[in-house]
Amino acid sequence: MERSDEFPKKTKDVSLQELRDRLAEFARVRGWEQYHSPRNLLLALVGEVGELSEIFQWKGEVARGLPNWTAADKTHLEEELSDVLLYLVQLADVCGLDLGQAALSKIIKNAQKYPIANQTISTAFN
């Protein structure tokens, strides 16, 4: 297995499995597994969501693609989004859940709950 600090500059598609494996190895070699209880990971995740929220806090509405953002702002956003994703993947892992399968199941449930025939433009975003 590659070390968790080694990766190609741009990877087209990264699986949740790869992220989970790299995160587990990262924690294992540092002796951090003992601290990665579901509660601790959830609290860390909430903290990271707060940091992500701060980025948008005073910006008002933001256009898709972030056309008015600097490269530094976009990099900061990428880092905070990554922190959220990584804690979420770790939390699912220590809980013994298949996050990818759970997400696909949730999409199917949502499609059943909100069928296309019942949607209008005004209700689709509520």
Image: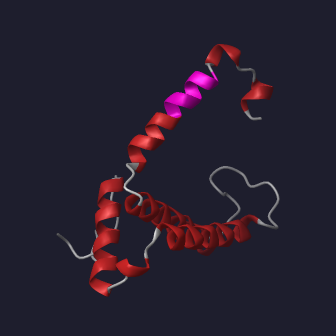
* Horizontal side of residue 11 vs 103, given as left or right: left
Image quadrant for the N terminus?
Answer: bottom left
Q: Residue at x 62, y 19 (%)?
A: 115
- Relative image position of residue 18 (x, y in whole percent): 29, 59
- Relative image position of residue 50 (x, y in whole percent): 68, 70
Magenta stretch: give its range: 107-114
**Which image quadrant is residue 16 in?**
bottom left
* Horizontal side of residue 32 vs 112, given as left or right: left
For the view shown, which residue lies furthest in the top direction?
A: 117
When the figure is inspected, residue 49 is found, relative to residue 66, above or below; the finding is: below
Rendering colour mode: secondary structure
Total tally of numbered discs in the picture: 0
- Relative image position of residue 97 (x, y in whole percent): 39, 51
- Relative image position of residue 5 (x, y in whole percent): 31, 78
Is 112 magenta? The answer is: yes
- Does the magenta stretch mainly form a helix, a strand or a loop? helix
Q: Residue at x 46, y 35 (%)?
A: 105
Name the foreground residue: 100 vs 69.
100
**Which image quadrant is residue 12 in?**
bottom left
For the view shown, which residue lies furthest in the bottom direction?
A: 30
Is 81 magenta? The answer is: no
Q: Residue at x 59, y 71 (%)?
A: 43
Image quadrant for the C terminus?
Answer: top right
* Horizontal side of residue 119 vs 13, given as left or right: right
Let me know if residue 120 appears in the view.
yes
